[in-house]
């Protein structure tokens, strides 16, 4: 009997349900797939504050990933909050010895409320050890600037330039998310080494929502697991997130 493809979610929990694993799992199931999990951190949060963060031991993160691969047909991996350099190293070493499936990395650095979700000394490790084995990295404008060690780009041209720079540096595709910038359109740009940039545009909706980065990266991972191209996966994921923000709450 064929097994249902799974997306392995490597991420942190958020007690408010606004972001993190709860968002990832609901997204993967909306795409008709099942999730398996490696929990990297337990966080105590409301929608306004991060009250407490407990990182899981790196060897526990690695063991969860190995068990998830052993138990299921994992067709893609989504990586969210990692927390520490040791967790990044553990995740990288499991991926190196696992079946080669597309990995989508949402470089979760800071919460909307301003709390650091990745230790500062871990940024180098993320860029050096993990990004090069990913199919796609999905920074927002602030994360992109932090990863490049520069100031946030003032406009779309600047954001493209920074995305291209990161893509060249980590030798993989980068989706620059412009959702938090000003303007009537929400513009994301996909940059890949040796490929022309691809622009995705959607009307900006008047109300914001937490967890959209989690949803977008999980939706891209699910679409890749279903066999869509990278560009079509981004298109389909962006439509999914737009529909979620637009629906009555
Ligand atoms: N908490 C966890 C566990 C997350 O994974 C993330 C983002 O991925 C956040 C918080 C940040 O979400 P927000 O920026 O919506 O606060």
Image (tube, grey):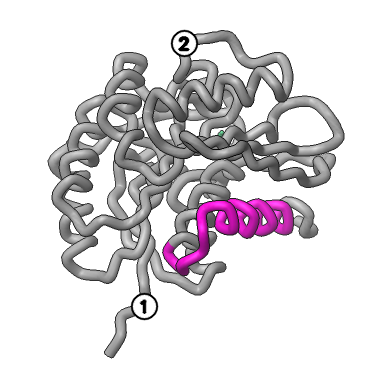
Q: Quadrant of residue 161?
A: top right
Instruction: Name the one closer to the observer, 241 or 233.
Output: 233
Frontmost of labels 1 and 2 is: 2
Nearer to us in this view, 11 or 223? 223
Residue under pointer 1:
4
Residue furthest bottom in the image: 1
At 54% from the left and 17% from the top, the residue drawn is 145
Name the quadrant of the C terminus.
bottom right
How many numbered marks appear? 2
Residue 127, position as x, y percentages in the image: 34, 25
Residue density around tag 2, few if under 14, some if 14–19, many if 20 or more, within 10 Å: few
Q: Residue furthest front?
A: 194
Q: Residue at x 40, y 50 (%)?
A: 78
Q: Is residue 196 above or below residue 23?
A: above
Q: Is residue 237 left or right of residue 100?
A: right
Q: Which residue is mark 2?
A: 149
Question: Mark 1 packing: few (<14 Cα in 10 Å), some, or many (20+)?
Answer: some
User: Residue placed at 53% from the left, 56% from the top?
Assistant: 219
Q: Which quadrant holds the N terminus? A: bottom left
For residue 85, which numbered disc appears in the image? none
Asked whether residue 33 is drawn in magenta, I would say: no
- Measured from the top left, where is residue 27 in percent x and y? 53, 60
**Does the stretch in magenta take in 239?**
yes
Question: Mark 1 and 2 residues: CB-CB less than 8 Å, in contact?
Answer: no
Magenta-colored span: 225-244
Between discs 1 and 2, the one toward the N terminus: 1
Q: CA distance from mark 1 to mark 2?
A: 41 Å
Q: Is residue 45 visible?
A: no
Expressed as whole percent of the image width and height from the top left, the position of residue 148 reads 47, 16
């Amino acid at each position: 009997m064929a097994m249902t493809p799974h997306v392995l979610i490597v991420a942190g929990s958020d007690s408010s349900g606004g972001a993190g694993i709860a968002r990832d799992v609901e997204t993967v199931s909306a795409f008709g797939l099942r999730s398996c999990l490696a929990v990297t951190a337990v966080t105590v949060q409301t929608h306004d504050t991060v009250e407490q963060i407990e990182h899981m031991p790196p060897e526990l993160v690695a063991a969860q990933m190995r068990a998830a691969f052993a138990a299921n047909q994992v067709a893609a991996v989504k990586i969210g909050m990692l927390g520490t350099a040791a967790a990044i190293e553990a995740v990288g070493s499991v991926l190196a010895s696992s079946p080669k499936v597309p990995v989508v990395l949402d470089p979760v650095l800071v919460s909307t409320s301003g709390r650091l979700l990745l230790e500062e000394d871990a940024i180098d490790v993320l860029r050096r050890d993990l990004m090069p084995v990913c199919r796609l990295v999905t920074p927002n404008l602030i994360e992109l600037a932090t990863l490049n060690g520069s100031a946030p780009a003032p406009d779309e041209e600047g954001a493209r330039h920074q995305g291209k720079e990161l893509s060249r540096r980590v030798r993989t595709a980068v989706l620059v998310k412009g959702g938090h910038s000003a303007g009537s359109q929400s513009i994301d740009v996909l940059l890949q080494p040796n490929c022309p940039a691809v622009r995705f545009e959607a009307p900006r909706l008047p109300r914001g929502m937490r967890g959209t980065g989690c949803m977008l990266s999980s939706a891209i991972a699910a679409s890749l697991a279903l066999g869509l191209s990278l560009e079509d996966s981004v298109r389909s994921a962006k439509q999914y997130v737009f529909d979620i923000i637009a629906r009555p709450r």
